[in-house]
Amino acid sequence: GLREREAAYRELGGEAGWRVLCLRAAAVVGGPVRSEIADYLDAAMPVRVAGFDPPIQVLHYSDLLDALERGVSEDVTGTLNVVGRGVVLLSRLVALCGRLAVPLPETFARWLAPAALGPDALKWRCVADGRRAEQVLGFHARFSAEEALAA
């Protein structure tokens, strides 16, 4: 999984005498980078699982660049979560983008969910804690989740 790959990168970097910092970025919006959230919003028919409205974290592309710049310039190792300010519920995220996500029973949502964001992700989302990136890198996202979507 993800943790094992990060540990392998740190081990390889350590053997080479390199400093290794892994940045785990929330779904990026704006700019040339694509994320599962951007692909979901571009789907012909974004759907929701009825009865679920998970919180979504997004990170504006310019905030990602800021975090990368700080990561390169600071003497920091380890793994840091890089997230935007706050979260937005899936239903609000879709509405902010001028779309409608049809709430469907889970069985139908499994068939129709865009490949970019499967039905399990439409029910349960992890929300990452970005406080360590703030403390160690001095990273503070300029954009809230809603501002990132509007930009």
Image: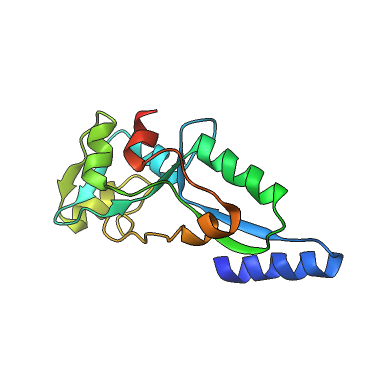
The answer to whether 32 appears left or right of 57 in the picture is right
Residue 133, horizontal then vertical, whole percent: 54, 56
Taking the spot 21% from the left edge, 44% from the top edge, the residue there is: 91
Residue 92, horizontal then vertical, whole percent: 23, 41
In depth, the one of 134 and 34 nearer the eye is 134
Residue 56, horizontal then vertical, whole percent: 33, 50
| Quadrant assignment for the N terminus | bottom right
Residue 136, horizontal then vertical, whole percent: 59, 59
Q: Against 123, is 102 above or below?
A: above
In depth, the one of 147 and 6 nearer the eye is 147
Taking the spot 15% from the left edge, 53% from the top edge, the residue there is: 50
Q: Against 49, is 16 above or below?
A: below
Q: Against 96, is 1 above or below?
A: below
The answer to whether one can see residue 143 in this image is yes
| Quadrant assignment for the C terminus | top left
Q: How many marks?
A: 0
Taking the spot 16% from the left edge, 47% from the top edge, the residue there is: 103
In depth, the one of 109 and 80 nearer the eye is 80
The answer to whether 77 appears left or right of 131 in the picture is right
The answer to whether one can see residue 81 in this image is no
The answer to whether 91 appears left or right of 134 in the picture is left
In depth, the one of 105 and 80 nearer the eye is 80
Q: Against 81, is 35 above or below?
A: above
Taking the spot 15% from the left edge, 55% from the top edge, the residue there is: 105
